[in-house]
Image (tube, rainbow, N blue to C red):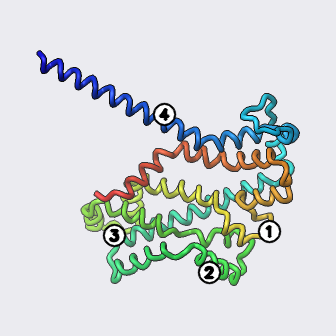
Amino acid sequence: MEQRTDYDKMHKRSRTQNRLQKTAVYIFLTFWALIVLFPFYWMILTSVKSYASYNAEYIPAFFTLSPTIQNYLDAFTAVPLAGYLLNTLIFALATTALMVVVSTLAAYAFARLDFRGKNLVFTLFLSLMMIPTELVVITNFVTVTNLDLRNSFAGLILPSVTSVFYIYLLKENFEQVPDELYRAARVDGTSDLKYLWKVMIPICRPTIITITILKIIECWNSYVWPRLITDDPAYYLVSNGIQEIRENGFGRENIPAMMAAVVVISVPLIILFLIFRRKIMAGVSRGGVKG
């Protein structure tokens, strides 16, 4: 009976400790979430303040009693924000589509095809990840300029249609598919392209969706290359268009209007991530574990 009582006490003490630990973890995560989300809150709050009320604040206010949407109207009427969004959408979708095709074919070749020097070629291919981005940008700039592709969608898109990391991620994922499936398909006379389309892509769909979403986000946030290769406002993306808005649109002083433009630019990515966050996590974890 005494042993039973001691067991109950230990079990109760263990449950209490688990509850305290969970409570501490939740408190920490809540505090950290507030820190992470506060800039977004401040951005949205500033975007709904009028220019006069914002400038009248000697001490920043954490709320407003008179929100306005005028800044959002100005974001589409005072500056060509809609054009910047359209350019970015074209750039992101075209670049991502080409990148997915190139990366899928390259990953399949490294994962399933046998050719002389494959391991050496793949090792040299991975070594490209150690080259500083600045050197690649300089080389791409010279090449695109010599091809007379500046201020064009082709010049924006072509240098970004491949990714060593995404090819490596897909290759690791493709290698998880049993070799028996490939051998059976080859015995049935299935071509490599048909096997890739009918078998590999459906099985590895989470990883492909993941790299697609990550590439779209990467293109949407791209700044250095678009800023370097375009000086024609007709080809500005949202990343470098926001600088044009600041300099020649609203002006440096109209912070609420700038924040409204930033909110409009950020919302598509936030929605995209919230919708596909589970697929992103599943794809990355699946691609990084071999089994």
Determine whether the residue tagged by mark 4 lies in a helix, strand or loop: helix
Q: Return the residue at label 4.
A: 27
Q: Is residue 189 left or right of residue 131?
A: left
> What residue is pinned by disc 1?
232
From the image, tell me which residue sits under label 2: 139
Left or right: 226 as drawn, with respect to 211: right
The x, y position of residue 71, in whole percent, is 82, 42
Residues marked 3 and 2 touching at CB (< 8 Å): no
Circles 3 and 1, Cβ within 8 Å, touching? The answer is: no
Mark 3 is surrounded, within 10 Å at the Cα level, by few (under 14), some (14 to 19) or many (20 or more) other residues, namely: some
The answer for how far apart the CA atoms under marks 3 and 1 are is: 44 Å
Helix, strand or loop under label 3: helix
Q: Pinpoint residue 232: horizontal percent, then vertical percent.
A: 80, 68
What's the CA distance linking mark 3 and mark 2? Answer: 32 Å
Classify mark 4: residues with Cα within 10 Å, few (<14), some (14-19) or many (20+).
few
Q: Is residue 176 above or below residue 42?
A: below
Q: Secondary structure at mark 1?
A: loop
Label 3 vs label 2, nearer the camera: 2
What's the CA distance linking mark 2 and mark 4?
49 Å
